[in-house]
Every structure is written in structure tokens, then in C-alpha cells.
């Protein structure tokens, strides 16, 4: 099956509705909380209708909703899957702990840069790749092989 045929069979209203609901729930939001967080831009009844596929979602609305949820449009529509990196040297950082920590501006700046460059707006966990260790070591002015223990000592690793 070629890519176009595969996309045609996978992109369904039901699938889009399920993706919308999955994304909202992954953010820990109720329909009412979406309405509150969006300051009324997204009404609970409308979002629920999109999720149940009782109402058609226009491209313009899909783009705005993807922006609200801070996910790529393809992820919202289900055309990309946000595959996880299988790098064995990957380290998962707890962004909540980093945000709360004091005296680590280099790590805060580094994680903000990684999240921004990868458009990873999860806000809770950030996976950094083996190839990210050297730039982080340089930012921290330590040896590359000391990065992991420094992050462990600061209790910044996601467990």
C-alpha cells in the first residue's frame, strides 16, 4: 500500500475525534477545563462535539486547536504518531523539578532550548538524546561523563 492510500484509510472522523479526546485527557483536562483554560474560546460542548464527531472540524479550527493543545497538527489529526526515540543513551529529565530548582540556570536554559527546537511542549518530562550530553556538559562546564551523575545528584531525573 502506498503512502497516499495508507493516509486515506487512516484519516477518519472517528480517528480524529479519538485523537482529540486522547490529547485532551493526556493534558489532564476535562471539557469544562478546556473552556476555562481557553478563556471561553473553546466551549466545552463544541470540543465534546468534535470528539464525538457530531460536529465537523474545519482545517482552520484544527490548526487553532492544535495550537491550544500545543501539539503538531499531524499529531492532532493522527497522521503522525510522535514515535518515541529508542536511543539507549536517552535520559529523561523531570521538567517540574527543573522548574522548581534554584541555581541551575544553565540546565533550565538547555531544557528550554531542547524543548523549543523539538517542539516538545509536554511540560513534564523531556528526553534528551545521547547526542545532547556533550552540549549539556559544555553548558555546565563539566566533563561529558559527569553529566548523568550531576543530574542524579540534583534529583532532576524522571523516575
Image (spheres, grey):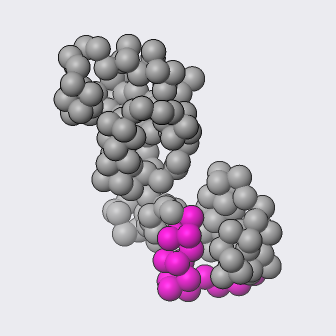
Main SS class of the magenta portion in the image: helix
Q: Please state the horizontal and vertical placement of residue 57, each as a whole percent of the image.
A: 61, 82
Q: Please state the horizontal and vertical placement of residue 112, each as a whole percent of the image.
A: 38, 48
Q: Along the line of sight, which residue is nearer the eye, 91 or 139?
A: 139
Q: Along the line of sight, which residue is nearer the eye, 145 or 11?
A: 145
Residue 18 in sight here: no
User: Which stretch appears magenta?
Assistant: 54-69
Q: Is residue 57 above or below residue 51?
A: below
Q: Is residue 55 magenta?
A: yes
Which residue shows up at 53% across the image and 27% down it?
158
Q: Please state the horizontal and vertical placement of residue 153, each as a whole percent of the image.
A: 45, 15
Q: Is residue 4 above or below residue 43?
A: above
Which residue shows up at 49% across the image and 77% down it?
63
Residue 70 in sight here: yes
Quadrant holding the N terminus: bottom left
Which residue shows up at 37% across the image and 17% down it?
150
Q: Please state the horizontal and vertical placement of residue 154, each as a whole percent of the image.
A: 46, 21
Which residue shows up at 80% across the image and 79% down it?
45
Q: Is residue 94 above or below residue 89?
A: below
| Relative to 24, 111 lies left or right | left
Q: Is residue 67 magenta?
A: yes
Amino acid at each position: 500500500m502506498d503512502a497516499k492510500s495508507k493516509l486515506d484509510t487512516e484519516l477518519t472522523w472517528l480517528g480524529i475525534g479519538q485523537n482529540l479526546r486522547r490529547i485532551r485527557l493526556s493534558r489532564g483536562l476535562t471539557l469544562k477545563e478546556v473552556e476555562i483554560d481557553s478563556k471561553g474560546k473553546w466551549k466545552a460542548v463544541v470540543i465534546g462535539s468534535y470528539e464525538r464527531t457530531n460536529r465537523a472540524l474545519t482545517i482552520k479550527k484544527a490548526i487553532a486547536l492544535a495550537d491550544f493543545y500545543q501539539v503538531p497538527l499531524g499529531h492532532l489529526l493522527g497522521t503522525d504518531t510522535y514515535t518515541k526515540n529508542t536511543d539507549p543513551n536517552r535520559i529523561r529529565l523531570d521538567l517540574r523539578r527543573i522548574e522548581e530548582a534554584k541555581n541551575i540556570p544553565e540546565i533550565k536554559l538547555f531544557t528550554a532550548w531542547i524543548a523549543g527546537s523539538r517542539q516538545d511542549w509536554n511540560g513534564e518530562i523531556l528526553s534528551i538524546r545521547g547526542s545532547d550530553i556533550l552540549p549539556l556538559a559544555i553548558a555546565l562546564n563539566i566533563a561529558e561523563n559527569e553529566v548523568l551523575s550531576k543530574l542524579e545528584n540534583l534529583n532532576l531525573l524522571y523516575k
